Image (cartoon, rainbow, N blue to C red):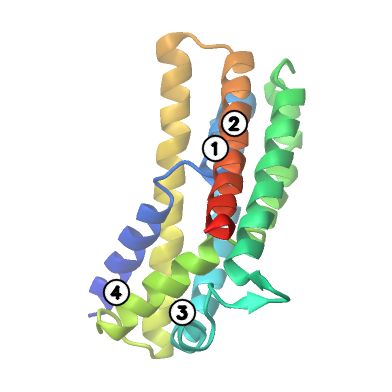
Amino acid sequence: MLFLTLIIGILLNAMGYIPPGNINLTVAQLTINKGMRQALYFILSFSIVEVFFTFGMMRFARWVSSDVNLNENVSEVRLGTYVDLFMIMLFVVMGTITWINRKKVPKTKAEDNRSKKGSVFYGMLLGVLNPVQIPFWLFFGNYVILHEWIKTDYLSLVIFSLGSGIGSALALYGYAHFAKYIQEKFALSSHIINRSIALFLWALALYLIIKQTVVYCN
């Protein structure tokens, strides 16, 4: 049963990082600009934070899902809107920073080694500032509990959370290798890739803006 719990945690969280978002695009950008080693530092630190985050969310998944509704209003604004607004700001800021640095020459290996702490800190920071995972675990966490796919004792949740961290690490590692493959296969410069990532982040922000506009217009 514990082995199945681990597998469910791995598959569920890996699935959550397949769609392009701020985290996997950050991994792709780090891989292109600073190399695979710095991307691995980011992935490891992010995944460690993800283990603790998942454990906390799973402990309260049933209670939160029954008492908190993303469609409820807080000061006449939907709770889900606050999450989207945060993600819009995050996408715009990250896209702008990427665009500004699009022509920046990648650092040498010596400089990359000195930026190890920066990659680790960045991974931990985005692990904490990742509100899109809150509704994800509110839904899927409660789903696996109600369907009795996993137990809710401490050991089971610890194993599930470890699986979640492994799942995010595997998915992000796949993104890192994909970004490296794309750059090598098509001989793309970091300038072109950075510009593409910036445009995509802005597109994600625009999508969320349109989504909220449609919600409130209806």
For marks 4 and 3 on the same chain, the one whose residue lies earlier in the sequence: 4
Instruction: Measure the alpha-carbon separation of dots 1 and 4.
Output: 28 Å
Residue 83 in the image: x percent, y percent? 62, 62
Residue 192 in the image: x percent, y percent? 59, 15
Q: Callout 3: few (<14), some (14-19), or many (20+) C-alpha neighbours within 10 Å?
A: many
Q: Are marks 1 and 2 in contact (CB under 8 Å)?
A: yes
Mark 2 belongs to which amino acid?
A: Gln
Residue 20 in the image: x percent, y percent? 47, 41
Answer left or right for 176 relative to 29: left
Task: Kindly report which numbered mark, 2 or 4, lies closer to the viewer in this rendering.
Answer: 2
- The tag on residue 149 is none
Q: Which residue is mark 1?
A: 25
Task: Kindly report which numbered mark, 1 or 4, lies closer to the viewer in this rendering.
Answer: 1
Q: Callout 2: few (<14), some (14-19), or many (20+) C-alpha neighbours within 10 Å?
A: many
Q: Which residue is mark 3?
A: 58
Q: Decide if residue 51 is in sight here.
A: no
Residue 68 in the image: x percent, y percent? 54, 82
Mark 1 belongs to which amino acid?
A: Leu
